Amino acid sequence: MTESIGKTNLLGLTQLEMEKFFDSIGEKRFRAGQVMKWIHHYGVDDFDAMSNVGKALREKLKACAEIRGPEVVSEDISSDGTRKWVVRVESGSCVETVYIPQGKRGTLCVSSQAGCALDCSFCSTGKQGFNSNLTAAEVIGQVWIANKSFGSVPATVDRAITNVVMMGMGEPLLNFDNVIAAMHLMMDDMGYGISKRRVTLSTSGVVPMIDELAKHIDVSLALSLHAPNDALRNQLVPINKKYPLKMLLESCRNYMSALGEKRVLTIEYTLLKDINDKVEHAVEMIELLKDTPCKINLIPFNPFPHSGYERPSNNAIRRFQDQLHQAGFNVTVRTTRGEDIDAACGQLVGQVMDRTRRSERYIAVRELSAEADVVQSAAPRN
Ligand code: SF4
């Protein structure tokens, strides 16, 4: 990545932040909208291409600002149309972004961190430990890169990306401010204009930040559940030891009711052979979720080397789905996509730079868990 000392990267600025930036350089606020459209609608990273911005202002912007996304290391296209980008971020690590086309819908799965400290036992990202939080520019930069790659210009008219899920590498709620800013840009008409129902934040259960979320943004929420009781979830999703299921589901329900509309929580449940795929697990899940308006997405495990887990048989998957279905739940089974380019759910690894030694990982887990206790006080961005 190129050096940029002292320059403001405009890519990750929300509309309000962009207006403040123009204020700070003695320019009119309306310039914010003009420049944002060039950046997000037209994928422009060169001030000279902004034809409705006068030469003097373009020169001024070149001196103090830049538009810089993550560096694209590779782009692979699967036989089923799924695409995967590997991008290098400021910390030197690489993260992955995946695009899944399905009929008229095109879903972009975006990463929020290089690696992850939460160490879920079945997750390839978690196996690498934590390296760094992505900046807002690096989070929204993944949408920017994908849009440019599709030639979706302007982005709000010819849409390849109809949905975004914060479900790639990392725990988005442990990179709260940057993820919130990027999600505002996803929904802002000056950004990508995606509806709030089509932008989803997926969390493994950082309760204090779920409690904080509704004060800052209105997006769909997904919970990575993966186990129907605390004993098993403690093993599979270790953050559960700190924020157990009762507390977690209450927090999710509060988020949805705070938005004042009828909302449904998406439950993500990775099915692991002989671990959490038995009838008794389905029965426990029915009891656990009986008071939570939700739809359930079952994800048969996508194996990766040395994971120690296996994918259940099709019969076991169907049996589990039927059990939940008969209890009245809306249940889908996620089809594996992009397996030939290692883009399937749970397979994202990127290339996380050092800090992956286990001792450091556990320090990071402790630090981040402690951080999550401190409810962040950032003002809403927009
Ligand atoms: S499942 Fe999510 S929260 Fe858990 S280790 Fe993987 S990336 Fe982190």
Image (spheres, helix red, strand yellow):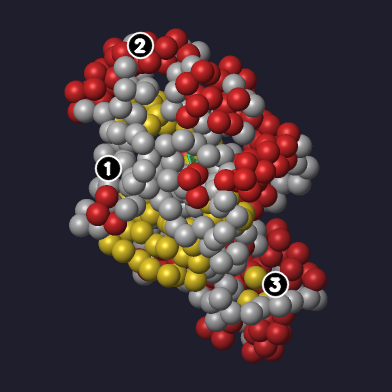
The nearer-to-camera label among 2 and 1 is 2
The nearer-to-camera label among 2 and 3 is 2
The nearer-to-camera label among 3 and 1 is 1
Residue at image point 31% right, 41% down: 303
Looking at marks 2 and 1 on the same chain, the residue that comes earlier in the sequence is marked by 2
Q: Is residue 14 left or right of residue 82?
A: right
Q: Is residue 276 left or right of residue 262?
A: left
**Label 2, label 3: how many angstroms apart (C-alpha)?**
55 Å
Residue 280 is marked as 2
Looking at marks 2 and 3 on the same chain, the residue that comes earlier in the sequence is marked by 3
Percent position of residue 321, x then y: 28, 21
Residue type marked 2:
Glu
Question: Which residue is labeled 1 in the image?
Answer: 336
Looking at marks 3 and 1 on the same chain, the residue that comes earlier in the sequence is marked by 3
Residue at image point 42% right, 63% down: 86
Check the image and report above or below for 150 versus 82.
below
Disc 1 C-beta below 8 A from ligand 1: no
Quick one: SS at disc 3?
A: strand
Q: Residues within 10 Å of mark 3 (few under 14, many from 20)?
A: some
Image quarter of the N terminus = bottom right
Residue type marked 3:
Thr
